[in-house]
C-alpha cells in the first residue's frame, strides 16, 4: 500500500514538473509570436491543470477574442471561470463550446455541472443527458445526473442513475455512497443498510461518514 501511494505521489510530481516545463515552452512561444492563439489556449489549459485559474482566464479570454470559433479555448475558459466561482460565466463558455462542436461530450458534462452550480437544474439534466447520448459509459456523468435528480427530490430516478454509474464502475465510492443516500430518501432502510455494507468494502471512510450522518440515530 505504501509503495502504491509513493508511486502515485511520484506520478503527480512528474506531472507537475511536465506541466511547468510546458508553461515555459508556451510562454516562450508567445514571446516570439504574441498573437499565437494555439499557444494561448495551451498555456491556459496548462495553468488550469496546475490550479492557476487567475492566470488562465485572461489568456483564454484573449484566445477566444482572437478566434471566436475555437471550441477548446471556450471549454478551457469555462473550466477556469468555473473553478474561480464564476458559474454563469462558465455556463456561457461551455455553451459556446458545444455550439461550435456538437459532439463535445466533455464540454456538455462540464456545462451540466456549471448549470447545477447555478441552480439551473432542468438545463443541467438536459446537458448531462446529451453527454450520455455521446458517451453512454461515462460513470461520472451518470453519478452527476443522479445528483441533480436527488437535489430535485426525484429519488427513484436518482437511484437508477447511481446504479448505472456503479454498473459501469463497481468501485466508484461516491456513487455507492449516493445510492445509499437515495435509499434513505426513499425510506428504504433495508436497501440502505445493504448498500452501506457494500460501501464498507470499497471505501471504509465514506461508509463511516454515511453511517454516522444518516443511519446511527434512525
Image: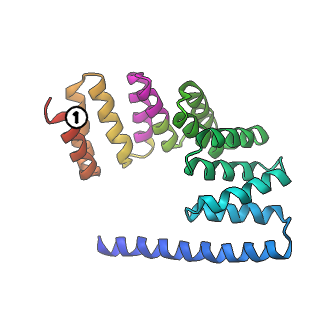
- Percent x, y of residue 78: 65, 47
Name the residue at 39% across, 22% down.
156
- From the viewer's side, name the closer residue of 57 and 181: 57
Name the residue at 62% across, 59% down.
54
Indicate left or right for 56 with 210 as reference: right
Q: Main secondary structure of the magenta part?
A: helix
Name the residue at 76% across, 77% down.
28
- Percent x, y of residue 177: 32, 40
Location of residue 44 by image quarter:
bottom right
Location of residue 26 by image quarter:
bottom right
**Image vertical order of residue 139 relative to residue 2, above or below:** above
- Percent x, y of residue 210: 25, 41
Q: Is residue 22 magenta?
A: no
- Percent x, y of residue 41: 74, 60
Display colour scheme: rainbow
- Can residue 136 be seen? no
Indicate left or right for 210 with 151 as reference: left
Give neighbour class at mark 1: few <14, some 14-19, many 20+ (Cα, 10 Å).
some
Name the residue at 57% across, 51% down.
84
Secondary element under disc 1, as helix, strand or loop, is helix
Indicate left or right for 77 with 146 as reference: right
- Can residue 197 be seen? yes
Magenta residues span 145-167
Q: Which residue is mark 1?
A: 214
Amino acid at each position: 500500500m505504501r509503495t502504491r501511494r509513493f508511486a502515485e505521489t511520484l506520478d503527480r510530481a512528474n506531472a507537475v514538473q511536465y506541466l511547468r516545463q510546458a508553461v515555459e515552452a508556451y510562454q516562450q512561444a508567445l514571446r516570439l509570436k504574441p498573437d499565437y492563439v494555439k499557444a494561448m489556449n495551451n498555456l491556459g489549459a496548462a495553468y488550469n491543470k496546475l490550479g492557476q485559474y487567475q492566470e488562465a482566464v485572461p489568456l483564454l479570454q484573449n484566445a477566444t477574442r482572437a478566434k471566436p470559433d475555437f471550441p477548446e479555448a471556450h471549454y478551457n475558459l469555462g473550466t477556469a471561470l468555473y473553478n474561480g466561482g464564476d458559474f454563469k460565466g462558465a455556463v456561457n463558455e461551455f455553451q459556446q463550446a458545444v455550439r461550435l462542436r456538437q459532439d463535445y461530450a466533455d464540454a456538455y458534462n462540464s456545462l451540466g455541472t456549471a448549470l447545477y452550480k447555478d441552480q439551473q437544474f432542468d438545463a443541467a439534466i438536459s446537458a448531462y443527458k446529451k453527454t450520455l447520448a455521446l458517451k453512454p459509459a461515462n460513470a461520472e456523468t451518470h453519478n452527476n445526473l443522479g445528483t441533480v435528480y436527488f437535489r430535485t427530490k426525484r429519488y427513484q430516478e436518482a437511484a437508477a442513475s447511481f446504479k448505472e454509474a456503479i454498473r459501469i464502475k463497481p468501485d466508484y465510492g461516491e456513487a455507492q455512497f449516493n445510492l445509499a443516500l437515495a435509499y434513505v430518501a426513499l425510506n428504504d432502510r433495508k436497501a440502505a443498510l445493504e448498500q452501506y455494507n457494500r460501501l464498507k468494502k470499497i471505501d471504509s471512510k465514506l461508509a463511516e461518514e454515511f453511517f454516522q450522518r444518516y443511519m446511527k440515530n434512525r
